[in-house]
Amino acid sequence: MTDITLVHGDITEQEVDAIVNAANSSLMGGGGVDGAVHRRGGPAILDECRRLRASRFGGGLPTGYAVATTAGELPADWVIHTVGPVYSESEDRSALLASCYRESLRVADELGARTVAFPAVSAGIYGWPIRDAARIAVGTVLNTPSQVVEARFVLFNEDAYAAFEQAL
Ligand code: AR6
């Protein structure tokens, strides 16, 4: 049974077994959470991402998938990179967003991670409305069996925190 907790803050500072990165399919870094993860985690993360691109994910990590690397200099042991869908008004992509959480928990189980911190995947640069993103995030984690004992949603601002509180 996974306990869901909500905190205000910066995901890169979390002392958990694994943090989830809201990456893009290149795995080569970007802004938002991804920028902070690579900036604070140091070059070891990008080195491993490059190796993943050269081996398993030549075409990039597909949307809805997740893959782990070292967390470099971050307090966590691992970073689980997942690629959220860009929000679309004309197409329902919520199954892909749910897949990000399900796959991240699956990878966490493979690693033996028991505490995992998540950002609000897709709710920043990828434009997902926060209330809907929160509903999908909380609902999927609650409905996905795993060995993770704490799924901690780390919310960067007041709106995001309120949306997750309501979803919970
Ligand atoms: N800690 C916790 N939450 C954060 C942090 C942080 N340090 N920084 C931002 N947020 P985003 P996406 C919140 O844009 O929408 C990158 O360029 C933010 O307020 O990081 O999935 C990637 O390379 C928002 O609520 O991820 C991709 O190209 C949430 O985290 C693209 O952005 C997610 O915002 C992915 O966009």
Image: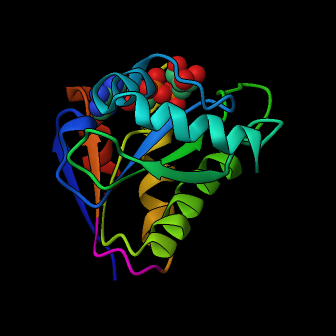
Residue 53, image x, y percentages: 71, 38
On the image, which quarter does residue 156 sit in? top left
Vertical order, 1 against 39 (above or below): below
Vertical order, 107 against 158 (above or below): below
Vertical order, 117 against 106 (above or below): above
Q: Nearer the viewer, residue 93 or 30?
A: 30
Residue at the image position 51 percent from the left and 62 percent from the top = 140
Q: Is residue 154 visible?
A: yes
Residue 54, image x, y percentages: 75, 39
On the image, which quarter does residue 128 sit in? top right
Vertical order, 124 against 114 (above or below): above
Residue at the image position 79 percent from the left and 26 percent from the top = 90
Residue at the image position 36 percent from the left and 69 percent from the top = 113
Q: Quadrant of the N terminus?
A: bottom left
Q: Is residue 121 visible?
A: no
Number of disc labels: 0
Q: Which residues are magenta?
A: 146-150
Q: Quadrant of the C terminus?
A: bottom left
Which of the four quarters of the rendered structure image does ligand 1 lie in?
top left
Q: Is residue 82 left or right of residue 63?
A: left
Residue 71, image x, y percentages: 36, 45
